[in-house]
Amino acid sequence: MKSGTVAVIGRANAGKSTLINVIVGEKVSIVSPKPQTTRDRILAVYNAEDCQIVFQDTPGIYKAATLLSERMQKATESASKDVDLLLLLIDAHEGLKDEDKALIGRFSTRGYPMIIAFTKTDIMPENKLMQVISELGELPKNVCDVTAISARTGKNVKLLLKLIKDRLPEGEPLITENIISDKSERFMIAEIMREKVLLKYDKEIPHGVAIVINVFEKREKGSYYINLDIVCEKQNHKAIIIGKQGKALKETSSFAREGMEKFLQAKVFLEVYVKVKPEWRDRPERLREFGYSEDDMR
């Protein structure tokens, strides 16, 4: 049996969380078209008769601008050192960027076994894809495999899994419990709320938002009562999140409640409040309070 760990790395919006959700068959990471969607290192477990693959979904790699984003980059760097294999995703639709080449150079020169997968190939012509792949140039054959996939259509996902399995060592399952993620229901509820904020609001507002769960309570008849805060950094951001006569917040909360009910498979009673904590992303005490301490993100 093959068994091992795989860190999924790449620039922001390369499709890391989407691919992992497709492979595992469950929502273990939130998805949006905005950078900084994934903030934590999240384990996701794929089980088959002949293998177990423990994926680590990591924050996208980009230039850190706050203490929070600096810690996110450290989490990605740490993940790359503790695994059997690196899976580097490159957005083929955007083309091969200098940042991608730098990542390939950084990890291949360290001798890390790595698979490079070009993503989002369903939205680009085949000839352009071949051109982008050719720009990789010569790679160390003993280090890198290269493939092209589409998580949305499933194109070559099975091939990618075979490439991963072939690279993993023989061994017993690393995780024996019947779980697909190391994150709690409480964590995922907060992430679902944050996902809907990312999808609802534009520009800088989503990046300055944290979700704090005050009450997560399962009631006798199986329903859930959830009370949470959306924390933002500025008063004008709070006004935008709430919207005229509370309309925007009601829409976002309804959107989030639907996602929570689908995840929990139960009725959810949701109360949402908006609070302002100036510059929380650069304050260690706030990061600790909101679950983004250095220990939390390892």
Image (cartoon, helix red, strand yellow):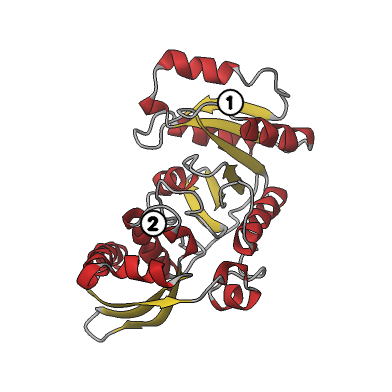
Q: Is residue 129 above or below residue 285?
A: above
Of the residues under marks 2 and 1, which one precedes in the sequence?
1
Q: Is residue 165 above or below residue 279?
A: above
Residue at the limit of the structure toward the bottom, as seen here: 220
* Residue 180 shows in the view: no
- At numbered mark 1, what does the secondary structure look like: helix, strand or loop? strand
Instruction: Return the residue nearer the eye: 143 or 9.
Output: 9
Mark 1 neighbour class, 10 Å CA radius: few under 14, some 14 to 19, many 20 or more? some
- What residue is at 41 percent from the left and 49 percent from the top? 21
> Which residue is identified by label 2?
198
In the shown orientation, is residue 284 left or right of residue 51? right
Q: Amino acid at mark 2?
A: Leu
In the shown orientation, is residue 203 left or right of residue 245? right
> Which residue is identified by label 1?
146
Q: Amino acid at mark 1?
A: Val
Q: Is residue 80 above or below residue 209?
A: above
- At numbered mark 2, what does the secondary structure look like: helix, strand or loop? helix
Between the residue at mark 2 and the residue at mark 1, the CA separation in whole angstroms equals: 32 Å
Instruction: Return the residue nearer the eye: 12 or 268.
Output: 12
